[in-house]
Image (cartoon, helix red, strand yellow):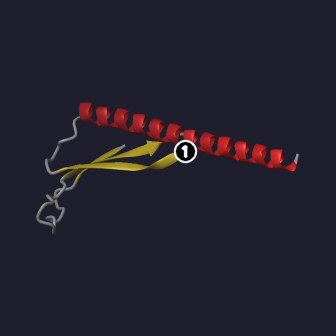
Amino acid sequence: MRVAYHPKLAPATHPRLTPALTVCTIPLIGQRPLGVINVASARAGHFTLDLVNLLTASVEGLGALMENAHISDEREQMARQLVQSQNWRRRDD
């Protein structure tokens, strides 16, 4: 996890966007690295230790959720393959 303060970031070019002065980057990890979550704030010092801990716990839960979904998808695919192989065997009998 990394929290950084960027006082010299250029203003946003899109009218609906505000420049981010503080960015918190948290790795998204399941059983393997899945990516990163970036959370930005226009307020300097926005990410207190409590907020960083909350974000970290949330991202850890998200990583576990994504990993479980991936495992569930793999199980469903294996079940379909098993049914297909049984159907092929029945045709051959």
Binning the other alpha carbons within 10 Å of mark 1 as few (below 14), some (14 to 19) or many (20 upward) gives: few
Q: Residue 26: horizontal and vertical position, in percent?
A: 37, 44
Q: Residue 73: horizontal and vertical position, in percent?
A: 56, 43
> Which kind of residue does numbered mark 1 sit on?
Arg
Tell me the quarter of the image containing the C terminus: top right
Relative horizontal placement of residue 25, taking residue 21 as reference (left or right): right
Q: Nearer the viewer, residue 16 or 70?
A: 70
Relative horizontal placement of residue 53, taking residue 16 as reference (left or right): right
Please, which residue is most extreme toward the right here?
Answer: 93
Q: Residue 47: horizontal and vertical position, in percent?
A: 22, 40
Q: Is 33 situated above or below 58?
A: below
Q: Is 14 situated above or below 56?
A: below
| Mark 1 secondary-structure assignment | loop
Q: Residue at x 22, y 36 (%)?
A: 48
Relative horizontal placement of residue 27, taking residue 50 as reference (left or right): right
Q: Give the number of marks.
A: 1
Q: Nearer the viewer, residue 93 or 15?
A: 93
The residue labelled by disc 1 is 32
Tell me the quarter of the image containing the N terminus: top left
Please, which residue is most extreme toward the left here?
Answer: 15
Q: Residue at x 66, y 40 (%)?
A: 79
Q: Residue at x 86, y 50 (%)?
A: 92
Relative horizontal placement of residue 92, taking residue 20 as reference (left or right): right
Q: Is 49 situated above or below 37?
A: above
